[in-house]
Image: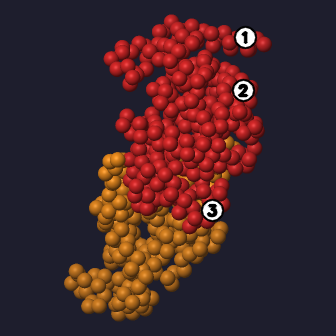
Chain colours: A orange, B red
Amino acid sequence: MAELAAPLPTWRRMAANGRVLWGGGFLLFLALVALFAPLLAPHDPLEQDLMLQYVPPFWAEKAEPGFVFGADNLGRDILSRLIHGSRIALTVAIVAAFAAGLLGTVLGLLAGYLGGWVDAVISRLVDIWMAFPAVLLAIVLVAVLGTGLHSVIIAIAVIDWTRFCRVVRAETMAQKEQDYVASAVTIGLSRFRILVREVLPNVVPLLLVLLTLEMGIAVIVETILSYVGLSIASDIPTWGGMISAGRQYVHQAPWLLVLPIVCVVLTVLALNALGDGLKDTLDPVMRK
Amino acid sequence: MSAILDIRDLHLDIVASRRRNHILRGVSLDVRPGEVHGLVGESGAGKTMVGKVVLGIAPPTAQVTGGSVRFDGGEITHMPDRARRSLMGAGLALIPQDPMTSLNPARRIGDQITDVLRLHLGMGAGEAGERALALLRDVHIRNAGRVVRQYPHELSGGMRQRVLIAIAFACRPKLIVADEPTTALDVTVQRQVLRLIKEMQENAGTAILFVTHDLGVVAKICDRVTVLQAGRVLEHGPARRVIEEPEHPYTRALMKATPRYDRPGDLLEPVPPALVDELNAAAAAYDRERAGA
């Protein structure tokens, strides 16, 4: 019996996708930088030297050797601060996105699979949640919870679970009608087992895409919260905190503002590119 | 010989937004142990719905309004969930219509076969894995060792249907509902799959309720046959008799509309519209009578 030509394995299609390559590559680079920040940073990010105030980046005339991206208003090395700032950005992105994903996926699976009043309650909750402006809600939450890394992560998870919930619910409803679910019923599997073992694996590709996109959103939200001073204590360098401080010296030293913004933008772009690329390679419709 | 499946006067409605459509109008049939019982009819006759009621997978909008379905002596309509689950796959199984969509695309073939073995026969992973390989060889899949590690999209339609047949026979059920198992396959593969089902059925002594619209298939593998039209049984009897000397004009018309391998060159005649109108009118009259009673 002739077999159908097997399509390329998933990882081969991913490797052939440009956006997955550059997005994933950049993020891998960033993850390594964050992991080895103390080794990579040329200076202590907190070390002040008033002799080095406003030293410009390497391309300017009065650049100081050893301070590639110059120094800030307190004479702290910008490159070292950017490198250390990536730790907070990535920690928040990963932990908050997974927390939001977990909460939203569990509720979305239940709503989509059980339907009826469970679906009605969860869906109305999502509607109400989404009526609040996200950033305002985040600021209120952090104000209530108190500043700090934990609060930022909890705030993002509590706000953004709705993105996962909606999409996972819709996908679960679609999967539930598939013949393979009816087949699973006819071999006597329980409803819970069908949900976890049969339906969930078919929702995972979609979840991966959502997770990468959510990580981009989490980076931005963390930046905003740092910018308004509601994130991490100021003795830990963050990109948002650097933007906030740099804003005051934008006329003397515009790079103080521009460089952390570039970091945020590149990171979010990389995450979005990875998400888009994954969508193309994992989407069962595109795959057919 | 007592029947393994005994359907008596089964009535079923589909209720959708205040409209109530009668789908089954007093269907009775019985399947004896070890026989292949054909259930034939055109699209919309309700034959698939009979199979779904037996399997307990009728849609939520379907309501059984009367009659009984007894499997192995026990009533199985309105069965509690837990009892139904211990029956499904073990005593009662399905060979589905569309092999392309009936396997989970995200799980390996081997895992989908071992599920049913571990659930009902209490096998461990190792033993179930061994049995899965044996089952795949039973359905004449040659490189079984490779197939258990593959995903459904790596297999052809015929291969997938073989896998589904292996799952259906895995726990040696007493009855299998085969819901048009060859309709989605191309003609050459149809013959192989049909022969395989017959072979497995004879070896295991399983009874099969074979839902189909293809009288050619009935002639090949069924022992007895029930003809369904508009949710009513028009004729039933031994397959050979029904096919060679149909009693009901509708069955006769169906036979004339079916290509015959044994009589090539015969012209096909469509079922006369007047006959269909007459039967539908009779069904409507039946509904009125029942509503009045």
Three-letter amino acid code of the residue under disc 3: Met
Residue B19 screen position, x and y as percent: 64, 22
- Looking at the picture, tell me which residue is in the foreground, A240 or B141: B141
How many marks the image carries: the answer is: 3
- Between marks 3 and 1 in the image, the one whose residue lies nearer the viewer: 3
Chain designation of label 2: B
Q: Secondary structure at mark 1?
A: helix
Please state the chain letter of the residue tagged with numbered disc 3 in the rendered image: B
Question: First in sequence: mark 1 or mark 2?
Answer: 2
Residue B123's tag is 3
Q: Is residue B273 above or below residue A171?
A: above
Which of the two residues, A234 or A15, is positioned nearer the viewer here? A15
Horizontal placement of A21 versus A275: left or right? Answer: left
Q: Position of residue A81 (x, y in %)?
A: 40, 82
Q: Give the residue pinned by disc 2.
A: B8
**A52 w.r.t. A142: above or below:** below
Q: Which mark is residue B289?
A: 1
Q: Which sits earlier in the primary sequence, circle 3 or circle 1?
A: 3
Q: Which of labels 1 and 2 is toward the front?
A: 2
